[in-house]
């Protein structure tokens, strides 16, 4: 992820789902010293670990953490294009709404990476109506039909969808 962020020349990014900070460190490193990353998470406990590692990695000065529901944080931001890059690895039922809120805030040519979009292949089993699987299936169909974006789902790990705003 660091290489992707660096290669696209991103200077502003947002992450939904920070957990212990692994991906946020990669994004912040890719943004460089002048970059800014907004991290959104609901857990003070897990993000306290992230804060420690941001300090060790030397990127704490370029990260702003907001504790609270990701949708509330996104909706509190201006609708104007402000991000070059976004990473989503949060509550799966929120994915469709995260996409709807992120896209207007992403610059043309900007990139959204979304994790867990294969759900261990369960998205292909229509008899599986589990909450997360159904939400990811809805998300995958939503982005596939959206003419404003180009997408590719890469079968790395549990699936990562790359969404580029046209």
Image (cartoon, rainbow, N blue to C red):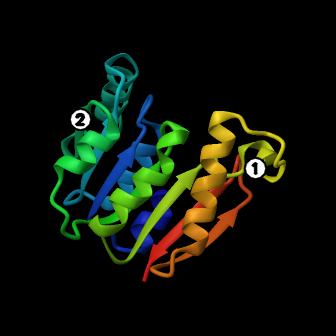
Quadrant of the rendered image containing residue 133: top right
**C-alpha distance separating marks 1 and 2:** 31 Å
Nearer the observer, 61 or 74 = 74
Q: Which mark is residue 53?
A: none
Give the mark count: 2
Give the answer, above or below, for where 2 lies relative to 45: below
Q: Residue at x 81, y 49 (%)?
A: 126
Residue marked by disc 1: 123
Give the answer, above or below, for where 5 lies relative to 45: below
Q: Secondary structure at mark 2?
A: strand
Residue marked by disc 2: 66
Residue 22 x, y percent position in the rendering: 47, 38
Q: Residue at x 68, y 53 (%)?
A: 159
The quadrant the C terminus occupies is bottom left
Residue 132 x, y percent position in the rendering: 63, 37
**On the rendered structure, is 134 left or right of 35?**
right
Label 1: how many Cα within 10 Å (few below 14, some 14–19, many 20+): many
């Amino acid at each position: 992820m660091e290489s992707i962020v660096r290669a696209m020349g991103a200077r502003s990014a947002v992450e939904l789902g920070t957990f212990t900070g692994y991906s946020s460190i990669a994004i912040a490193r890719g943004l460089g010293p002048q970059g800014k990353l907004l991290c959104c998470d609901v857990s003070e406990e897990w993000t306290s670990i992230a804060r420690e590692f941001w300090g060790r990695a030397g990127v704490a000065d370029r990260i702003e953490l907001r504790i609270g529901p990701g949708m509330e944080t996104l909706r509190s931001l201006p609708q104007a294009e402000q991000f070059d890059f976004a990473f989503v690895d949060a509550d799966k039922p929120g994915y469709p709404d995260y996409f709807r809120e992120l896209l207007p805030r992403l610059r043309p040519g900007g990139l959204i990476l979304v994790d867990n979009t294969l759900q261990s292949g369960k998205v292909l089993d229509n008899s599986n109506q589990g909450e997360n699987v159904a939400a990811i299936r809805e998300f995958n169909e939503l982005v596939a039909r959206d003419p404003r974006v180009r997408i590719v789902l890469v079968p790395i790990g549990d699936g990562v969808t790359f969404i580029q705003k046209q």
